[in-house]
Amino acid sequence: MKRYDRLKEILRLDPERDFLRIYRLTAAYEFPWDLTRALELALHRTYAVPAIGGLLARTGEFTGRPQKRYDDTALLLDAVLEHGFDSEDGRTAIRRINRMHRSYDIGNDEMRYVLSTFVVVPKRWIDAYGWRRLTGHETRALVNYYRTLGRHMGIRDLPETYAGFEHCLDSYEAAHFSWDEGARRVSDATLALMASWYPAPLAPLVRGASTALMDDSLLRAFRYAPPKPAVRAAVRGALRLRGRAVRLLPPRGTPRYARRNPQIKGYRDGYRVAELGTFPVPGTGGCPVRRGGGALS
């Protein structure tokens, strides 16, 4: 197989009908590393919305057990990608996601915003750092994939186009990004988790590289010091060079799903999709934390 053969296969498919197949090829074969990094950044962006980041801080999950939360999130989302919406594992993953969300006071606007990050941030990342840009064909499939996921999650008023998702993300962030002490703790815990995946001497470099990839609005919301322009240029330049190097490599022959990523560390002996994620705290009536921070009696 030659470097662009899989793209030719993608372009022969119909993004309205074959969106799962197209997105699976894009995510698991063409850009698995890029999609993983982009989705990490996408989730990180959501913390800068106090209604989201503050809630995550109050649950204590992302600050107390960040590796498990990372693993569970990646594995649940990837179960749908790998097995499909109508498969047993795909349906189970969506039920787990929905049951977790129903345990908290989360509004439709917030849910739609988070879904928008899954559409917009990966396209922006790949267009900037991937070995090639996403085609319009792939972008339409990406939109249809996440519109389908959003419908399964009961999210209302979903955008119909990439431009619609982009507008949803940008306008929501402009209105809602702001400082929250709990959200900053969640962000710090996430950066510490990412640094822990590498040898200890590299931890400061990993954290510096992570903040260098944040835009100014995200840095302001978390009150992180802006990286030096030279650092930002070096990090982003290195990612672009990586993309050019990948372009010269043979195409991937086997799919790379999240369960194969070295960053997934909590399930070395395997896992059951039905047991991933969080479960209601006994005695709370199923809603352990409300947005205002008070536990139910």
Image (cartoon, rainbow, N blue to C red):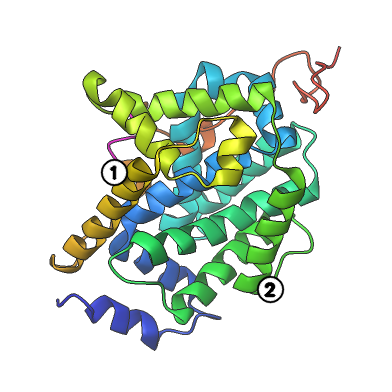
Q: Please provide percent x and percent y for residue 93.
A: 55, 45
Q: What is the quadrant of residue 284 in the picture?
A: top right
The Cα atoms of the two marked residues, 1 and 2, are separated by 32 Å
Number of the front mark, 1 or 2: 2
Q: Please provide percent x and percent y for residue 160.
A: 68, 73
Front position in the image: 189 or 215 = 215
The secondary structure making up most of the magenta span is: loop
N-terminal label among 1 and 2: 2
SS at mark 2? Answer: loop
Exactly how many numbered labels are in the figure? Answer: 2
Residue at the image point whose x is 71% and y is 68% from the top: 159
Q: Is residue 6 above or below residue 78?
A: below
Residue at the image point whose x is 40% and y is 25% from the top: 193
Front position in the image: 170 or 297 = 170
Residue at the bottom extreme, as displayed: 12
Q: Which mark is residue 260?
A: 1
Please tell me whether residue 12 belongs to the stretch shown in magenta: no
- The residue that disc 2 covers is 160
Magenta-tinted stretch: 260-265
Work out which quarter of the rendered image holds the C terminus and state it: top right
- In the image, is 102 to the left or to the right of 254? right
Q: Are marks 1 and 2 in contact (CB under 8 Å)?
A: no
Q: Please provide percent x and percent y for residue 245.
A: 17, 61
- In the image, is 262 to the left or to the right of 128? left
Q: What is the quadrant of residue 182 in the picture?
A: top right
- In the image, is 199 to the left or to the right of 173? left
The answer, for residue 16, to whether it is visible in the render is: yes
Amino acid tagged 2: Glu
Q: Is residue 125 above or below residue 140?
A: above
The answer, for residue 267, to whether it is visible in the render is: no
Q: Please provide percent x and percent y for residue 29.
A: 29, 63
SS at mark 1? Answer: helix
